[in-house]
Amino acid sequence: MENKSYDKISFAIFLIFLGIAIIFSNLGLAHWGNLWRFFIDFWPLFIIIAGIKVVLSVFKFGNIIEVVFDVIVNFGLLAVLLMPQGLLSRSFVSTDEIADFEREVVLDDKFESREFNFGLNAGDFSITDTKDVQYHLRTTGRYNPDISKLSQSSRTDRSGTTKISSELELFPNRTFRFFNSRSHNKFDFLIGNFSSEEVVADDINIDLNAGKLDLELTETTIEKMSMAVNAADAKLLFTEKSLPEKIQVSVNAGNIDIYLPKELYVDLKYVVNAGSVQLHHREGVRDYSGLNIEGQSCFNYDGLKGKCSETVRKVNIDLSVSAGSANIFWN
C-alpha cells in the first residue's frame, strides 16, 4: 500500500476520534480545557511523536505500525479530554526563585463607586472580601520575579468612580521561553469594605487566562460582574448581599462554577459553540450542551421553569461558551 493511502488512514482515524470527542462533549463528559493544559505542559511530546512517525515510515512494515501508533495517540488524547476537571491543573510550586508580595491600595479619595479590574495570566488566585477596613484592595502572595510581574494602580475619575487595576504580566521584557512554562504565581486579593450607612455599588471585571481562581464574596455589594475564562478553572460564590444584578461570563476552553443563593431565580441567556452549560437544581440537572445552540430560560432551585418578571427575585446571567463548560449551582 502506498504512503498516501496510509496518510488517508491516519487522517480518517483522527476524524473518527474527533467525532467521538464531540459526542462526549455534547454529553458533558469531555473537557476541552484539559487538552489545552496538556499541550502547555507536555508540548514536547508532539515533537517526539512526529519524529517517531518519520522513523517508522522508513521501515518495510513501518506504515502499519504507524497506523497502530496513530490509534494509540488519538486514544491517549481522548483519555485526556475525559479526565476530571482540575486533574491537570498546575501547582505552580517550584524550587526556582520565589518572592513574597504584599501591597495595599489605600482609601485616599472621596468616591461614589468602585471598579475592580483583574488581568490574571497564569497562577492560583483567590478573591475574597472583608469589612471595617480602610483600604480598597489588599494583595498578598508569592511569585517568580524572574518571569512575572504584578502591577497595581488606582485612580478616581470625574464621575466619582475609583478604578482599581491589578495586572499580572508574564515574562516582562523577554521573549517566550520554551523550557520554563510554569509561572509559580499564587496571589490572594482581599477587597475592603467600609462601615458606612451608604451602600457602595462595585463593578468587578476579571480576565483569567490560565490556572485557577476561587472567588467568594460576602460583604461587597456588586452591581455588575464580568469574567473571561480562557484555559482555567474558576469558582464564583455569592451571598444575597454580594450577588450582582448581572453576571456576564465568557468561557473559551476552561470551566466555571457559579454558586447562588437558593431563593433566587436565574434568568439565563446562553450561547454554546462546542461546550456545555448545566443548571444543577434540587430535582436534577438541566443540560444545554451541543454545537452552536443558544437560548434563554428562567429557573429556580426547585427546578421550576417560569417567567422572570419584574416581581421575581432574580439574577441575570449571560453565558458564552466556546469549547469549555459552565455550571450553575444553588448553594
Image (cartoon, rainbow, N blue to C red):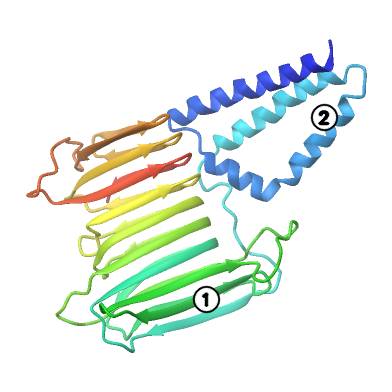
Give the farthest residue toward the bottom.
Answer: 108
Image quarter in which the N terminus is found: top right
Give the farthest residue toward the left.
Answer: 311
Assign a secondary structure to mark 1.
strand
Task: Name the residue tied to disc 1.
Answer: 151
Question: Residue 6: where, in percent of width, then height?
Answer: 78, 17
Question: Residue 228: where, in percent of width, then height?
Answer: 43, 54
Question: Residue 154: where, in percent of width, then height?
Answer: 40, 80
What type is the residue that disc 1 sits on? Ser
Whether 101 is drawn above or below 118: the answer is: below
Residues 109 and 25: in front is: 109
Residues 200 and 89: in front is: 200
Mark 1 Cα shell of 10 Å, populated few (<14), some (14-19), many (≥20): few
What type is the residue that disc 2 sits on? Lys
The answer to whether 152 appears left or right of 205 in the picture is right
The answer to whether 89 appears left or right of 96 in the picture is left
Residue at 7%, 49% in the rendered image: 311
Residue 235 — which label?
A: none
Mark 2 Cα shell of 10 Å, populated few (<14), some (14-19), many (≥20): some
Residue at 46%, 52% in the rendered image: 229
* Quarter holding residue 293: top left
The answer to whether 221 appears left or right of 157 in the picture is left
Comes first in the chain, label 1 or label 2: 2
Residue 53 — which label?
A: 2
Mark-to-mark CA distance, 1 and 2 = 46 Å
Assign a secondary structure to mark 2.
helix
Residue at 37%, 70% in the rendered image: 116
Residue at 60%, 24% in the rendered image: 17
